[in-house]
Amino acid sequence: MNKEVTEFIKDKTLINGQWLEAISGKKYPVFNPATGEQIVLVPDMGQADTRLAIEKAEQAQKLWLKQTAKQRSIILKRWAQLVEAHLETLATILTLEQGKSLAEAKGEVTSSINYIDWFANEAMRVNGDVLPPSAAGNFEFVKKRAVGVVAAITPWNFPNSMIARKVAPALAAGCSVVIKPAEDTPLSALALAALAEQAGIPAGVLNVITASSGHEVGQELCANPIVRKLSFTGSTEVGKILSRQCADTVKKLSLELGGNAPFMVFDDADLDAAVQGAIAIKFYNSGQTCICANRLLVQDGIYEAFIVKLQEALGKLRLGNGLQPDSTHGPLINEKAIQKVDSIVNQAIEQGARLVQGGSYLPEIGKQFFNFTILADVTPEMDVFKTEIFGPVAAVYRFKSEEEAIRLANSTNYGLAAYAYTEDKGRIFRLSDQMEYGMLGINTARFVSETVPFGGVKESGIGREGSVHGIDEFLEMHYVCIKN
Ligand SMILES: NC(=O)c1ccc[n+]([C@@H]2O[C@H](COP(=O)([O-])OP(=O)(O)OC[C@H]3O[C@@H](n4cnc5c(N)ncnc54)[C@H](O)[C@@H]3O)[C@@H](O)[C@H]2O)c1
Ligand SMILES: O=C[C@H](O)CS(=O)(=O)O
């Protein structure tokens, strides 16, 4: 491991500008999912540490809010520049703790840079309104003001960019943040915090709580009335728990939750483009993303041809340790994930799916490496239809008509991302009208950037991240009426 990587692998967490141990002195290990080796021990924090961080964040926010938007913007831009200057190091730390290929890790850190830079600019655009008086003699205006102390709870699959996507708009708005990263992948958050400190983000404005379980920390973040906003990215199940826990203090909520993305391929599609899209969004992060294609719905006329081409394309991918330059895809995050994907595949086969390839882990490179899998003849009656697989498993369903495809695609409680490949212009407009998803890609599978509103409908979440809308999640409107 090179010197800079070692320097940025932290064994303490940043609270109020100090690198601290847990008050209890407890620690827990962070492992490399590709090798099973322990990387480092980090503080295993609880309620007392969380309460301290919240109180310091409240004090710091009052001063941070007094800085001008320009001053906050300059500091955020400096943070983005430092992240860019340390891109290789941050990507290496990301791959070490999460497992994804170095190429994907660099892409994720680049996404973080773009989000931080975007919101450094958005900081300068928090405008209010002067209203036409609703009564004679009134002077009426609306100010947008920072919501206050923000709690951010993030997942393990994008341990770098999920931090940037929350912290950047929060700080741009004038808020302070207490972050609880996922227990499996805290190191990216700690490295970003170290660079934030170097960028001049004041003590207490950005704080990190590491913990082996989210429960105790989460309960304090949700129950403490000082916290005025919770921004959560993770499973729908946990999102519901946190929503309930925040209800007693009526916190502002942003929830980026689970998905069950349909990937529809119609007879008239460009088949090669559709196969490339499937590779890009089914096997992204080895299938461990909320926007991964979870159900591949392929029209009758091209069904077998699609499967043959998909199998050919998979032959070009290479599973392995993400640090190895020829690895295109890495391991699953932990043993529990392997067991979950294994049982989903076995259950689908027992229920009648046809195993075309894969179906288990690759013993020659380690139990954490689940092979690229194709299941054919999958039907909506099988349990896999309503399950977020979160692994490199392409479940391929057959449909006859456009109406059937849209009905199947929408028959889920989720509504995050959806994809369709067709050349029919009328169909494209019908899909954009009828698909019940926050985000729809037509003849493209990779459409996320800092400039677009990322988020879902139904049980995939509340609110949007990125775009001109993202900063509003961290602002409150205050209306003032002055009688002359
Ligand atoms: N919509 C999105 O943008 C998006 C992005 C990434 C992942 N996800 C979803 O996240 C899930 C996978 O990520 P995951 O396994 O980390 O999800 P998870 O919900 O298990 O955990 C997410 C975070 O919540 C914390 N957590 C878990 N239980 C908690 C509790 N009771 N109180 C407080 N915090 C708690 C975890 O420690 C982690 O930091 C998938 O469902 C995926 O679809 C969604
Ligand atoms: O897993 C979900 C992430 O939000 C994917 S992306 O970084 O937005 O593409």
Image: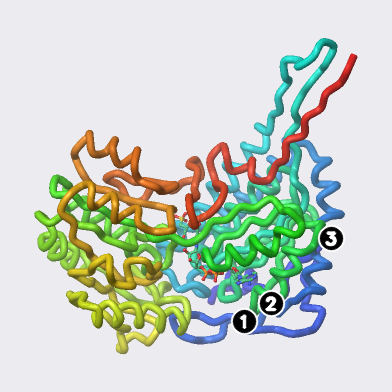
**Mark 1 or mark 2: which comes first in sequence?**
2
Q: Quadrant of the C terminus?
A: top right
- Compared with 48, 164 (above or below) is above
Q: Secondary structure at mark 1?
A: strand
The image shows residue 291 at horizontal and vertical percentages of: 41, 57
Q: CA distance from mark 3 to mark 1?
A: 27 Å
Which mark is nearer the camera, 3 or 1? 3
Inspect the image, locate mark 1, and give the three-letter code of the amino acid beneath it. Answer: Val
Q: Secondary structure at mark 3?
A: helix
Residue 252 at least partly seen: yes
For the residues bearing labels 3 and 2, Cβ distance under 8 angstroms: no
Residue drawn where x is 52% and y is 66% of the image:
235
Inspect the image, locate mark 3, and give the three-letter code of the amino acid beneath it. Answer: Lys
Q: Which mark is residue 11?
A: 2
- Compared with 103, 432 (above or below) is above
The answer to whether 324 appears left or right of 137 in the picture is left
- Would you name the residue on which mark 3 appears? 56
- Residue 3 image-quadrant placement: bottom right
Other residues around mark 2 within 10 Å, as few (<14) / some (14–19) / many (≥20): some
Q: CA distance from mark 3 to mark 2?
A: 21 Å
For the residues bearing labels 3 and 1, Cβ distance under 8 angstroms: no
Other residues around mark 3 within 10 Å, as few (<14) / some (14–19) / many (≥20): many
**Mark 3 or mark 1: which comes first in sequence?**
1
- Would you name the residue on which mark 1 appears? 40
Residue 197 at least partly seen: no
